[in-house]
Image (cartoon, coloured by chain):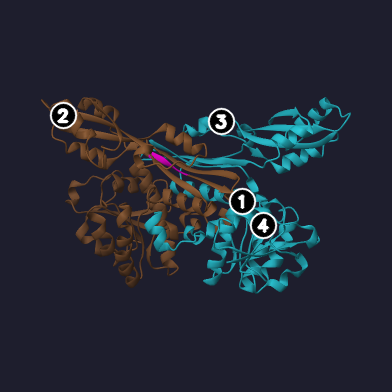
Chain colours: A brown, B cyan
Amino acid sequence: MKIGIYGYGNLGRGVECATLTHKDAELVGVFTRRSPESVKTALGTPVYAAADVEKFKDKIDVLILCGGSATDLPEATPELSKNFNVVDSFDTHAKIPEHFARVDSVAREAGHTALISAGWDPGLFSIARLYASAALPDGSDYTFWGKGISQGHSDAIRRVPGVLDARQYTVPIEAALSAVRDGETPTLTTADKHRRECYVVLKEGADADAVREAIVNMPNYFADYETTVNFISMDELQKNHSKMPHGGMVIRNGRTGVDGEHSHTVEFGLRLDSNPEFTASVLVAYARAVVKMNSRGDFGCKTVFDVAPVDLSVFSGEELRKRML
Amino acid sequence: MKIGIYGYGNLGRGVECATLTHKDAELVGVFTRRSPESVKTALGTPVYAAADVEKFKDKIDVLILCGGSATDLPEATPELSKNFNVVDSFDTHAKIPEHFARVDSVAREAGHTALISAGWDPGLFSIARLYASAALPDGSDYTFWGKGISQGHSDAIRRVPGVLDARQYTVPIEAALSAVRDGETPTLTTADKHRRECYVVLKEGADADAVREAIVNMPNYFADYETTVNFISMDELQKNHSKMPHGGMVIRNGRTGVDGEHSHTVEFGLRLDSNPEFTASVLVAYARAVVKMNSRGDFGCKTVFDVAPVDLSVFSGEELRKRML
């Protein structure tokens, strides 16, 4: 399959690298809204202006959109679905239905297949929730995130006056996780399940106590959480906190039997060294599915729920039944 | 959906109970090759002779086959696919391609949909292996089973002269599991990953040492494994070892990045109080998918790889995108 990458940040770079292991993926080019000469790709993939992408409509089987969910994808995914099969990682959960509807009408009319919200959450975690709830209709679901860097929370800290740079780790609360793994079904808020660890570099002369107070009392982001703030040097931040690890677990506890006398736990977990590279690799697997679905005439907007596992694989159904079932 | 249960052992009883939580499932009847009067169902579902099942062909949307893989299903699944949409839990991994081919030709010709090898392994574990390998093409897979009762190994012990009854637990070896969870990619045989715990009731006058030797040296089943044999009373067996717990984990460690510099771990795990009840509940979810696929004209033999997650759910795609994505 011939792939184009639209947008070249951490995720776009991850898609480029993912083609090293997804052997059926051939990279046609990277498309950027920056000046193409200013973008240096990890593997030397040619870079073109985003404005020229339409010229490649017959040279690309699927375009992987690597922009952000806040402003890029709501515009780009429907727009590009006119000329391409696309995959995006739109992750604003509450706005997925709206995004779906806009993309669906364009893709359907153009005879393209557009898969939105791929990655791990939404994505593999969503699938884990669905399989577990289908297997255990009478049960309770728990999603824990971390330990990992939250870009949104790190950005929120960076906006506090006196902060030069910051990283925020979302960390599952061990006691809550253990209880759920033991089959208990407590009612837990996001704050009951997670604590927030902040690593902050102060600007010269900034008041550490004031910064700490501003962080821990920030509504929505930190006020409801157990939050720890550690002040460190820029050197230390760059040395120890420059990676982008993440992960988490989806756990469902459910009951079966005449009187619900038997308890079962289903758990799906990820431990990722690099959130963008793993997400990118999932996007490439879904790009493969999009090409297969489109070739069967399955047009319109899709999510990970609509994709049969076989379509993610380079192997045929026959090979998979022999090797993996 | 209107469901028939063909075969009424632990699994058939599990399917009957699963309809308590799968609210869209309506039980038409249980079909048995025993005398119908001799079968008492858990929920009072009517029992009919297996020979009469054809009379119900217009009253049943999907027949769930609850026989064994050794002799029942190789005959029953193709035969019943002539008149019914069916789901089975055929679990002889090596014979799946052959079973698939036989069922496929019958079901396709009859315009039925037949899903084979559903459950958790083959089944949810197979799906976990496929998703993980699609997300991380460069990696290594590990399946650990247990802690749980292996019926085959328990039966093998019962065939040893001097044994009155027995239960065998397959138990993951903690050191191997920890290494894999830590991201290591060792080469491990089944025996490297599992030990075998046997609980044996002797016949009166039996020679315990001879029985132990016969067990631990039994080829294929025990000879290659770390095996412990505990002699207990029938009372103790019935009190402490009469349940059918099982479970296990599928773990994949893979790498991404320009030089494979980032490591990731994907883990899917189950802890089941009752293996047959959980398996049965998965079969009912796949029965739902079979009915949906058949109504779309998607005929022939299918496996869990061919079923899009959305088809397992009672909820619509729209509801799922809103609630679970």
The magenta segment is: A247-251
The circle on residue B176 is 3
Position of residue B50 relative to residue B246, above or below, is: below
Q: Nearer the viewer, mark 1 or mark 2?
A: 2
Q: Nearer the viewer, mark 3 or mark 2?
A: 2
Residue at point 51%, 71% (across, down)? B296
Residue at point 77%, 33% (across, down)? B235
Which is nearer the eye, A261 or B97? A261
Horizontal arrangement in the rendering, residue B18 relative to residue B136 (left or right): right
The circle on residue A210 is 2
Residue type marked 3: Ala
Residue type marked 4: Leu
The residue carrying mark 1 is: B279
Horizontal arrangement in the rendering, residue B35 relative to residue A240 (left or right): right
Circles 1 and 3 on the same chain: yes
Host chain of mark 3: B
Residue lying furthest left: A205
Q: CA distance from mark 3 to mark 4?
A: 43 Å
Host chain of mark 1: B
- Regarding residue B235, the answer to whether it shows in the image is yes
Q: CA distance from mark 3 to mark 2?
A: 49 Å
